[in-house]
Amino acid sequence: GDSVTQMEGPVTLSEEAFLTINCTYTATGYPSLFWYVQYPGEGLQLLLKATKADDKGSNKGFEATYRKETTSFHLEKGSVQVSDSAVYFCALSDQGGGFKTIFGAGTRLFVKA
Amino acid sequence: DADVTQTPRNRITKTGKRIMLECSQTKGHDRMYWYRQDPGLGLRLIYYSFDVKDINKGEISDGYSVSRQAQAKFSLSLESAIPNQTALYFCATSDLFAGELFFGEGSRLTVL
């Protein structure tokens, strides 16, 4: 079945550092890919998405490119801020999976001032 | 007001008690979901509903039941709560075409 694997955390960075959170997926069809973010005490909210190969999703300085050849959707940001401290979830939604959304385990990011 | 509202936000109960978590939405979406979040396990799907007459089991439905009372309301029940059902529960909605999920703020359940 479909699955999502993302790097374990926590990830601790200093402010203005470069961020990469790796995400790879397994899917039977051609899934849409998502990154969600969960700030402390809140529900998840969509950060960015990509619906087909080579698409790049971007939002709030974050970006991720849908790489079908490597089945990856790595999240990057050039300069993190303290306010980016949160848990980040990679996810996919696939017609073959009945359009249910499958989540990775989440990666907690701490950004130090 | 939030588009997806969950009640209660926090609940402590004892083993064997019946618990209901309620979710209501003003998004106008047909699709509603219940997920469970545990540390290190991400979110796992419990049940989902693609319209009022449609209920489907997710990957971890044992010990849970749901009711879709209306397009806007989807409740999750634990008939006889047990300690390993202690978790953070999220309701979510989406529109028809596998798009973005919209989450409530979560219901933290502790079973003693």
Image (cartoon, coloured by chain):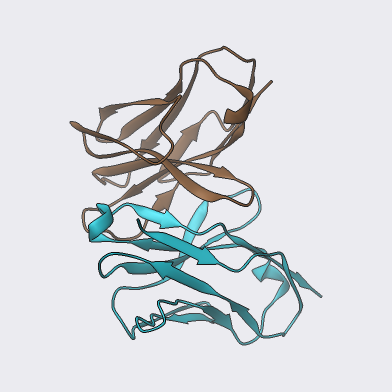
User: In the image, which lettered chain appears brown?
Assistant: B
- Would you say A36 lies left or right of B98 here? right
Residue displayed at 50% across by 59% down: A104
Q: Give the percent coordinates (x, y) of residue B63.
A: 46, 24
Q: Is A42 situated above or below A26? A: above
Q: Is residue B17 above or below residue B35?
A: above
On screen, residue A49 above or below A18: above
Q: Classify residue B28 by image quadrant.
A: top left
| Left or right, residue A13 beside residue B51 | right
Asked if residue B14 lies left or right of residue A5, the reply is right
- Position in image of residue B18 (x %, y %): 51, 14
User: Horizontal placement of A75 versus A93: left or right?
Assistant: right
Q: Nearer the viewer, residue A23 or A19?
A: A23
List the single residue furthest toward the left. Answer: B53
Q: Position of residue B14 (x, y in %)?
A: 64, 15
Quadrant of res B99: bottom left
Whether residue B74 is situated above or below residue A64 in the rendered picture: above
On the image, which quarter does residue A6 sit in?
bottom right
> Which residue appears at 72% of the width and 85% of the height?
A16
Between residues B1 and A5, which one lies in front from this camera angle?
A5
Residue at the image position 63 percent from the left and 24 percent from the top: B83
Q: Hue of chain A?
A: cyan
Q: For the N terminus of chain A, which image quadrant?
A: bottom left
How many discs mark residues in the rendered view?
0
For the C terminus of chain A, the image quarter is bottom right
- Residue at the right extreme of this rendering: A113
Residue A7, how many percent across, how many down? 60, 69
